[in-house]
């Protein structure tokens, strides 16, 4: 099959696909396939017939031809992109409105008692406010845990592998001393929590 024949066959296939495309999405898919095919065709023609010519080497005529080709693609691509942007904007609209409403409601609820959210419990997801009892991690203070999910002193001590877990050796010594103190007081099963 010659190049012309195979091109004609591909064009016929695209035409056929466009005729049976019943939804806007299907039509768009065919248009996209057409664009991809023509871009590939141009690349192939440039390679096989004209060789690889860089933009500065083009004659005035070739430059205009190139401009025309790109303009042809843009003529299909730009309106399609605009249509796509419009569809995305329309799809987002009801969510944006509702999200803004809920965000405002949330602010109102928090401001009514001057509350500030510290975070959601890493374990169970419950919302924790500043002033709640809870636990944070020494090396990741953005992580908070509620009383139920927080570790006990026994668990705290068991979680330490060694001094390498701490930046400074003194920190390790201090942490272990505090753990041992609580455990020796019979409070090993109590949670290590404080006011957040
Ligand atoms: Zn929790």
Image: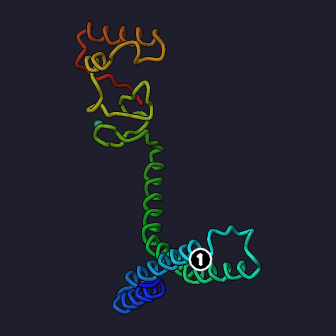
Residue 93, horizontal then vertical, whole percent:
47, 72
The relative height of residue 188 versus residue 19 in the rendered view (above or below) is above
The residue lying toward the viewer, choosing from 88 and 3, is 3
**Residue at the spot of label 1:** 49
For residue 60, side relative to residue 100 (left or right): right
Q: Is mark 1 on a helix, strand or loop?
A: helix
Image point (55%, 79%), residue name: 77
Q: Residue 36 versus residue 140: which sits nearer the camera?
A: 36
Ligand number 1: quarter of image = top left
Q: Which residue is drawn at 77% across and 79% down?
A: 60
How packed mark 1 is, by other alpha carbons closer than 10 Å (few <14, some 14-19, many 20 or more), is few
Looking at this rendering, what residue extends furthest in the bottom direction? 19
The residue located at (47%, 73%) in the rendering is 88
Counting from the top left corner in percent of width and height, residue 130 is at 43, 36
| Position above or below: 49 against 161 | below
> From the viewer's perspective, is residue 178 above or below residue 28?
above
Image spot of residue 35 (x, y percent) = 50, 79
């Amino acid at each position: 099959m010659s190049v012309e024949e195979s091109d004609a066959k591909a064009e016929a296939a695209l035409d056929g696909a466009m005729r049976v495309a019943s939804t806007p999405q299907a039509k768009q898919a065919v248009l996209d396939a057409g664009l991809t095919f023509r871009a590939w065709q141009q690349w192939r023609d440039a390679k096989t017939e004209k060789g690889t010519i860089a933009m500065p080497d083009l004659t005035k005529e070739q430059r205009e031809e190139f401009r025309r080709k790109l303009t042809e693609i843009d003529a299909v691509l730009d309106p399609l992109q605009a249509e796509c942007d419009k569809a995305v904007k329309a799809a987002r609209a009801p969510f944006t409105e509702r999200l803004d409403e809920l965000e405002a409601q949330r602010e109102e609820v928090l401001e009514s008692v001057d509350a500030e959210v510290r975070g959601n419990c890493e374990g169970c997801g419950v919302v924790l406010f500043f002033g709640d009892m809870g636990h944070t991690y020494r090396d990741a203070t953005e992580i908070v845990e509620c009383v139920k999910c927080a570790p006990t002193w026994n668990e705290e001590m068991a979680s330490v592998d060694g001094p390498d877990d701490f930046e400074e050796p003194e920190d390790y010594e201090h942490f272990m001393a505090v753990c041992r103190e609580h455990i020796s007081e019979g409070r090993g099963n109590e949670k290590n929590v404080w006011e957040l």
